Image: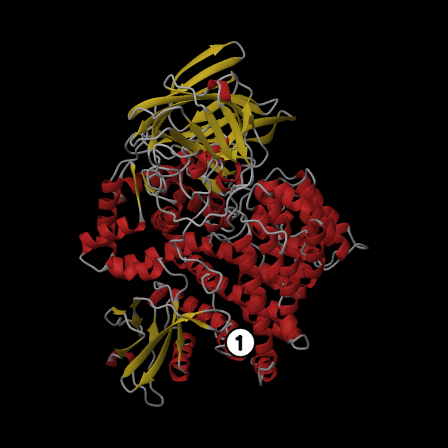
């Protein structure tokens, strides 16, 4: 699954917004099948292990299955025959299911998942047996069928009828709204990952319960009805058609998919003859051509890389108007947000093109890593998401080498290093004790740390050995499930390297080390300690693949297995005597998931190497990222970070300046609280660092310029506007005023519009609304999803209370789809944080009610809480949420509060830092 945010920023993927489990009810319809129906709304607080439960005793009560992490294993589904009849006007559906169940141990119970469904009590049969009791544990989404006597061992068929609602929650079986010929229509869509197939049909809704699926849909005759497999046959009876699909191979329930609506498509074929289609709303199919091209290339590349053909007869990719995640890898029927799949040469930005390519490559990688070989339990989710994130970069680098995508990959590593330096982080392999916990781990640890560790391992083992071992793993576990240990075992067998010992230190504990490097004679002494942004040091120890270099010479790799060790510095690294050109750099190209802190001599030599242009792009990024983190943790001064940043004044590379910009943004924000009297000068210094490359690029695109320069232009212009650079703001406003009278003007192409929109917002107030009203008009009237999101994301970027509140309240109107609410709050500036926090408190009940079914509710916390930097505010926020926290955003809240406390500590450090003002003035005064 791709996290939401694709197409909104220059990053491939952003925030994780997924369907999340809320408290629900399964209702029993009245029936005459005898026995009793019980519904248990309160759950016991049971501490359980996440491993499979032992087989149930033949007797006992239904209560033994309450509060368990996993379903029991004494009965397992082999095949589902599922028949669904959705009503797209009433927004309801009815269905029936016949499940071939293999009973493998003595029992009188069948235990499975269901939620938000009315199951017809009288219709339930296992073979000819009616249950004597039907018990529902609401808090667990579990149904227990009790029978009068033990069930026969072997295979039998469980049948039942049910009905439900096409909900508005973007999970389970839901409705998405769209316009066709000026009229509002509904489409029916599924989103089952992680635990929402149970909201569409009763099932064993866990990844390890793989089965075959044979679907039948009854739908309006004029609509397109898609599922995982090709259509076997269609029978049209007037206004209704019955569509039967071919039986699927073995797959997990979370990958079953259905899409019903009005669509058109573009089509292509892979080198092996697999048909690929991109389905869009009517009139938009031309915008699917780029994704189609990437899709065809991806399937061809992956079949060779994984050494296994694509397993299904077809692949469809569909753009959905209402979609909580960025995209979802359903087997053979991949669903996307529209901005994550559609690209228009005339109206889309370069960053959008890149996002679409990465997202398509990510989801299609899952057809092997996730769908063909599936994690055994959610603890191993990173096997799916980390690998798809990593290999999507490998694919896109192959298709578009000019994008320099591996350098951009360090964005992912930085995201993960930041989150994993919190005490509230979690291991990659995280214990999941209840379905309600799963959604919180679709985060930067699972995706970005997972992908970064895979890159580290590939770098250590070598690309060829790594690929061959992966192909062996895919072949061994095809149509089955695997755990993290299974992957390590195959890699170890194929390469002869101690993969399990090495990698277990990275996946089974949270965090990562900082390597302290100190010169002692001809040696570099290395010491590892767990790095935490709060300045403390955790107990973690890792086996660290150390790489070092001094330009063309790379030292031999070695594993740091102890807390301390020595590295002999090669003579090729120059002379340490005064005037010599000595320098050396650890963690070459950022392949290792750790930070480095150098002693003063090494740091000075490295800064000199940076100034004399001896470092690679990736190493330039690593140095500034590490320095920023060490400054936040008060292990080095802000003054030294500013001196290092100043060395990047002449930089022209997109990826390097993207990281420099992230650091300047962080410094600008913290200086408001830490040094209010100096904040203006600090902003002027940050402007000075970014101004030269911005002026070289200007506002207007140039013929033949690179994709990366096209992406760099808006990055720099937006940064200068945010830092208050008057000339850039005025030029943005000038161009916007021309644009609102002529949308086709060459003065404001798609790539630079967001910078101009943001410039307009700098002058907006309740008494000067003209620019704001003009932006609202662009939002309402634009037919382009990306442009609408750019406007929505900056409407709250203002200091005026009335305007900020008006913009935030848009999320409660029909103007903003629920899936986009997080974008509307993402633009809040630090100067308006109190306004936003008070708004959040006053509207919390409404927000939690509207967005409770998805992890969108956590994003409100994540967007507003970390803007603060005092322990008093952390305490106030903590008290407010003390009685309002749910499992769906508890982890997000703890992480956000920890960031506030880290900010507070950083503020105190900066306040007591001698010589900061002198450093700022000195750097400002340089020619």
Residue at the far front: name it: 60
- For disc 1, the marked residue is 642
17 vs 872: above or below: above
Secondary structure type for disc 1: helix
How are the residues colored? secondary structure
Question: Can residue 693 be spotted in the picture?
Answer: no
Residue at the far bottom: name it: 578
| Badge 1 density bin: few <14, some 14–19, many ≥20, Cα 10 Å | many
Question: Can residue 773 be spotted in the picture?
Answer: yes
Seen from the viewer's position, the closer of residues 207 and 274 is 207
Q: Position of residue 856 (x, y in %)?
A: 57, 46
Q: Position of residue 722 (x, y in %)?
A: 63, 62
Seen from the viewer's position, the closer of residues 172 and 918 is 172
Q: Position of residue 260 (x, y in %)?
A: 50, 25
Instruction: Look at the image and tell me in which quarter the C terminus lies.
Output: bottom right
679 vs 164: above or below: below
């Amino acid at each position: 699954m791709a996290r939401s945010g694709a197409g909104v920023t220059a990053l491939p993927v952003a925030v994780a917004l997924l369907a999340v489990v809320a408290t629900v009810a399964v209702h029993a319809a009245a029936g005459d099948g005898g026995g009793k129906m019980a519904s248990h709304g309160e759950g016991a607080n049971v501490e359980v292990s996440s491993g499979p439960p032992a087989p149930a005793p033949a007797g006992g009560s239904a209560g033994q299955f309450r509060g368990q992490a996993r379903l029991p294993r004494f009965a397992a589904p082999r095949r589902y025959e599922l028949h669904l009849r959705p009503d797209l006007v009433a927004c309801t559906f009815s269905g029936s299911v016949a499940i071939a169940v293999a009973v493998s141990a003595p029992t009188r119970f069948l235990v499975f998942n269901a939620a938000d469904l009315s199951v017809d009590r009288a219709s339930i049969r296992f073979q000819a047996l009616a249950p004597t009791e039907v018990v529902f544990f609401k808090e667990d989404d579990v149904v227990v069928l009790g029978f009068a006597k033990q069930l026969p061992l072997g295979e039998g068929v469980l049948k039942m009828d049910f009905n439900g609602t096409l909900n508005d929650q973007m999970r389970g079986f839901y409705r998405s709204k769209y316009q066709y010929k000026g009229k509002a229509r509904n489409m029916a869509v599924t989103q089952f990952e992680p635990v929402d197939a149970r909201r569409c049909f009763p099932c064993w809704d866990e990844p390890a319960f793989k089965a075959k699926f044979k679907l039948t849909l009854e739908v309006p005759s004029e609509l397109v009805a898609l599922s995982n497999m090709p259509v076997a046959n269609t029978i049209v009876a007037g206004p209704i058609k019955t569509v039967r699909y071919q039986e699927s191979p073995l797959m997990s329930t979370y990958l079953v998919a259905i899409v019903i609506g009005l669509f058109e498509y573009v089509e292509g074929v892979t080198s092996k003859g697999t048909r690929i289609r991109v389905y869009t709303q009517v009139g938009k199919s031309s915008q699917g051509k780029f994704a189609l091209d990437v899709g065809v290339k991806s399937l061809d590349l992956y079949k060779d890389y994984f050494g296994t053909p694509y397993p299904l007869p077809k692949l469809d990719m569909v753009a959905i108007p209402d979609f909580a995640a960025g995209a979802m890898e359903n087997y053979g029927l991949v669903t996307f947000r529209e901005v994550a799949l559609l690209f228009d040469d005339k109206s889309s930005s370069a960053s959008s093109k890149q996002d679409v390519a990465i997202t398509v490559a990510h989801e299609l990688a899952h057809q092997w890593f996730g769908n063909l070989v599936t994690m055994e339990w959610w603890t191993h989710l990173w096997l799916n998401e980390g690998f798809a994130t990593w290999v999507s970069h490998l694919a896109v680098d192959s298709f578009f080498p000019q994008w320099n995508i591996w350098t951009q990959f360090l964005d992912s590593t930085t995201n993960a290093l930041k989150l994993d330096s919190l005490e509230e982080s979690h291991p990659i392999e995280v214990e999941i004790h209840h379905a309600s916990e799963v959604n919180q781990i679709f985060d930067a640890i699972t995706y970005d740390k997972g992908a970064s560790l895979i890159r580290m391992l590939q770098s250590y083992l070598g690309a060829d050995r790594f690929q061959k071992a992966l192909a062996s793993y895919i072949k061994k576990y095809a149509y089955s499930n695997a755990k993290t240990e299974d992957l390590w075992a195959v890699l170890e067998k194929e390469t002869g390297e101690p993969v399990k010992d090495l990698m277990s230190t990275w996946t089974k504990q949270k965090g990562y080390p900082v390597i302290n490097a100190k010169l002692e004679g001809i040696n570099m002494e290395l010491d590892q300690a767990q790095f935490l942004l709060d300045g403390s040091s955790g107990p973690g120890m890792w086996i660290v693949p150390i790489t070092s270099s001094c330009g063309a010479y790379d030292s031999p790799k070695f594993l740091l297995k102890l807390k301390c060790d020595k590295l002999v510095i090669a003579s090729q690294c120059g002379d340490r005597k005064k005037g010599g050109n000595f320098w050396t750099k650890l963690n070459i190209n950022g392949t290792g998931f750790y930070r480095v802190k150098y002693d003063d001599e090494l740091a000075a030599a490295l800064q000199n190497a940076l100034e004399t242009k001896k470092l690679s792009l990736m190493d330039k990024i690593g140095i500034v990222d590490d320095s920023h983190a060490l400054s936040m943790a008060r292990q080095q001064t802000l003054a030294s970070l500013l001196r290092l940043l100043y060395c990047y004044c002449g930089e022209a590379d997109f990826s390097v300046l993207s990281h420099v910009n992230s650091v300047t943004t962080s410094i600008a924000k913290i200086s408001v609280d830490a040094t209010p009297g100096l904040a203006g000068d600090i902003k002027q210094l940050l402007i000075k660092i970014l101004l030269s490359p911005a002026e070289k690029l200007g506002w207007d695109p140039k013929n033949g310029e690179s994709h990366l320069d096209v992406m760099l232009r808006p990055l720099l212009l937006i940064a200068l506007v945010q830092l208050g650079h008057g000339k850039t703001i005025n030029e943005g406003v000038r161009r916007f005023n021309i644009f609102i009278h002529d949308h086709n003007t060459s003065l404001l192409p798609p790539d630079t519009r967001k910078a101009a929109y943001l410039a307009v917002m700098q002058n907006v107030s309740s008494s000067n609304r003209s620019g704001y009203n003009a932006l609202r008009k662009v939002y309402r009237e634009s037919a382009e999803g990306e442009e609408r999101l750019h406007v929505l994301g900056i409407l709250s970027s203002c200091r005026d209370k009335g305007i900020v509140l008006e913009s935030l309240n848009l999320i409660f109107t029909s103007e903003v789809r629920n899936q986009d609410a997080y974008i509307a709050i993402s633009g809040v500036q630090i100067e308006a944080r109190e306004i936003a926090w008070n708004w959040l408190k006053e509207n919390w009940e409404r927000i939690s009610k509207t967005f409770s079914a998805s992890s969108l509710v956590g994003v409100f916390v994540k967007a507003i809480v970390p803007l603060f930097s005092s322990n008093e505010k952390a305490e106030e926020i903590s008290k407010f949420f003390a009685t309002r926290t749910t499992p769906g955003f508890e982890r997000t809240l703890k992480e956000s509060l920890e960031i506030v406390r880290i900010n507070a500590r950083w503020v105190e450090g900066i306040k007591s830092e001698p010589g900061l003002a002198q450093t700022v003035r000195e750097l400002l005064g340089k020619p």
